[in-house]
Each structure stands twice: as structure tokens, then as C-alpha cells.
Image: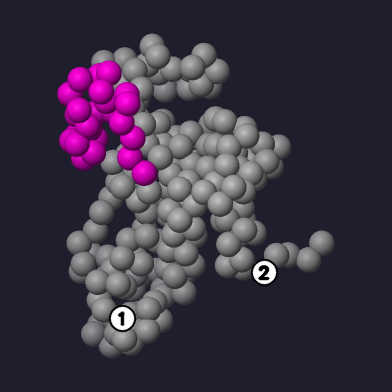
Amino acid sequence: MIFRTLSLLRSLQGAHHTVNDAQARIQQACDYRWLRGQLTHGMVGAREARLGDGTPAVSVVLPFVASPERRRGGRWPDDPDEREACFVEGAHACRAAGAPGYRKLESLSRGLAEGGMAVLKDAARFQYLVEQQALRLTWRRAEALPPDLARQLGRRLAEAGSERHGLFLLEVRLPASPREVSLNGDWLDRCLDRYRRILPTPAG
């Protein structure tokens, strides 16, 4: 197990980097995989968004009931008006929406299970989203949602607690046009790889 752990760390970051560096990479990969798994519950938001570098993008919105446990995770204000004026960005946005965080040994164990190259690739995809300011979490009262978004949410608004606690909306801005959107993990990988150049673009 020790040799496998050392091999994983070398494949992730190189021998001169620390265990903390490798742990951070693995956490990024875990965050990405969580986001990937949530995408099927999303809906198209703004159709003419922009990434941090100005790249045209489409906004995908992932809704979550803002339970008291989730609100504590983001230190949200008690006053609803103040809460609606706040937002959380980057990896913190995923964590506040419910993505699990892992302690050092837990993250290394997950890295061993998944394999170094797969972890590195998913971490790079997530880092791209963070660098492009593509992740933002906001809180909204159910009755204050824009009509188009409320219509798309449909059943989610009828879930227990959504009216009482409100909703967290995790906005993910992705470098694609609205007609290209396919809300699944494979599409997310392809979408990011095309712009990140993690993988070669398929011929044709």
C-alpha cells in the first residue's frame, strides 16, 4: 500500500511536491466527479453567458433544496434579503451545494482506487472551471425565481422544504452553444476537453 501511494503521488504531482498538493488534486477530481454526476438534474439557464476569459458560454443551473445543513456549510446570513445578495464561487460553491470533502487519507485512498492519470485529468477539468470563474452558488426564495427557471424546475419546487428553505442554484458556465447542450457527464467531458486541450480533438 505504501509503494502504491508513493507511485500515485509521483504520477499526480512529481516527487518534489507534497502530499498536500496531491490531496488537493484528488479533491479537485472528486469535486469534478460530483459535478459530473449532478449534471443530469440541471437545466439551461442563460444562453449568452461568458467565461472569465471572454469565451462564449452557456449557463447550466443545478438546483438544491437549501436545507439548514447546507446553509451552515456556506455561512449564509439568517436574513433572507441579505442571503439573496450573497454568492459563493469556485470549489467552495460545490462544497456549499453538498459536494463531499475528504480528509487526507480518505482522498489518497480514492486516488488509489481511481488511478493517477484519471485523477489528474478530472482535476485539470475542474481547475479549468475554477480559473474561468465558471462556478457560482446563489440562494433564492422559490417565489422569487424568474418565470422561465421556475417552469423548468417544475417538480423540484414541489419537493419538501423547497418553499420553506428556498433553493441553492449552482450555476456552471460551459464553453458551448445552447444547441450543443446535452446534460450528461460524457458531454461535460467532451465540452471541457475541447477547450482545455486535455485530450486531442477527434478527427472530422
Q: Which mark is residue 54?
A: none
State which tag comes first along the sequence, 2 or 1: 1
Point 31% across, 15% down: residue: 163
* Spot occupied by residue 11 in the image (x, y as percentages of width and height): 40, 81
Instruction: Give the SS element for disc 1.
Output: loop
- The colouring scheme, among rainbow, by chain, secondary structure or one colour, is one colour
- On screen, 143 above or below 5? above
Q: Nearer the viewer, mark 2 or mark 1?
A: 1
Which residue matches tag 1? 17
Point 40% across, 14% down: residue: 144
Q: 189 or 88, which lies in front?
A: 88
Instruction: Give the SS element for disc 2.
Output: loop
- Give the class, few, some or many, for how many residues have Cα within 10 Å of label 1's Cα (few <14, many ≥20): few
Residue 147 seen by the camera: yes
Q: CA distance from mark 2 to mark 1?
A: 27 Å
Q: Which segment did they paint magenta?
A: 65-89
- Horizontal relation, residue 66 to residue 13: left or right: left
Tell me the quarter of the picture where residue 137 sits.
top left
Is residue 94 a member of the stretch shown in magenta? no
* Spot occupied by residue 66 in the image (x, y as percentages of width and height): 28, 28
Is residue 71 a member of the stretch shown in magenta? yes
Q: Which mark is residue 200?
A: 2
